[in-house]
Image (spheres, rainbow, N blue to C red):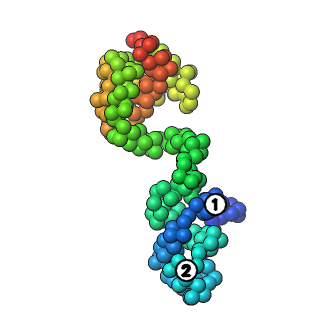
Amino acid sequence: MIILEDVVGGEAVKPWYDGLNLGGLSDADRVKILQYVVDKHGRETVQEVLKVSRITMWRLLNGKSRLDDERLKLLLTIITEEEFRKVLEARKVLEAAGLVRDGYVDYPLALEVVKLILRDEYLKNLVLRYVVDTYREDLRKLLGMSFAGIKLEWSEDFENFLSERKKRRKVRDPETISYYRNLFKKHLEGRELSEELVEYVANHRNGWLRNVFRHYVQYLYHRGGSRQRPSAG
């Protein structure tokens, strides 16, 4: 038997598939998973895991008998979450995770996922780059409506925003502030907020520049965008 179970400190860890909405997987998806596991581990091994006969295995693989949730969960114990995602289409994975139900997005749950993504710098930068590349025209319109003509200027007010008025993760370390200031002065100071600047920042090799730029845009929103321009320090 090769069913996998993770244990940390003597206590069983909740398996990756726990909480999946297995009922949302179609019969075709179940056969696809079964075929993948058979190809990976061999038919005899999978028969042992499922505790079924050769005839039953043939019926399951050919869609003559349905792979129920209990047997499906046994299959998931011998593959990884990454493999599960590769076998199924991305939308099917979202449905199994509960993000998509009956063809509709669960918005509260999706919002929680977005919040988690924004806490991870790498994922956040991937999302920002995707948004810039995919919705460039929308961003251009947004920038044109909200911040036309605004020039970026480092100021004491901006520093105060970073250290005292940011809603999340205030920046209070003097060395970090100094590093941000140097980056800003070198790459952003005096430049006009525009589509070209957004693209420049998004494609810059230094991820910290994106952080500084994002903080400054938050600062502009905090100040009221074009209605209240930041003053020079």
- Label 2, on which residue? 64
Question: What residue is drawn where x is 50% and y is 64%?
Answer: 84
Residue 109 against residue 27 in the figure, above or below: above
* In this picture, residue 209 sits left or right of residue 33: left
- Residue farthest along the right direction in this orientation: 11
Instruction: Please report whichever mark, 2 or 1, sits nearer to the chain's N-terminal start.
Output: 1
Q: Splitting the image into 4 quarters, where does residue 211 fall?
A: top left
Check disc 2: other Cα within 10 Å, few if <14, some if 14-19, many if 20+: few
Q: Residue flagged by tag 1: what amino acid is it?
A: Asp
How far across and down, in percent of the image, does residue 177 sit? 46, 25
- Residue farthest along the bottom direction in this orientation: 54
- Label 1, on which residue? 18
Question: What residue is drawn where x is 36% and y is 37%?
Answer: 135
| 102 vs 136, nearest the viewer | 102
How far across and down, in percent of the image, does residue 51 sit? 63, 82
Q: Residue flagged by tag 2: what amino acid is it?
A: Lys
Q: Splitting the image into 4 quarters, where does residue 142 fall?
A: top left
Tally the numbered discs.
2
How far across and down, in percent of the image, does residue 152 sit? 36, 19
Question: What residue is drawn where x is 62% and y is 84%?
Answer: 52
Residue 137 against residue 16 in the figure, above or below: above
Question: What residue is drawn where x is 29% and y is 29%?
Answer: 196
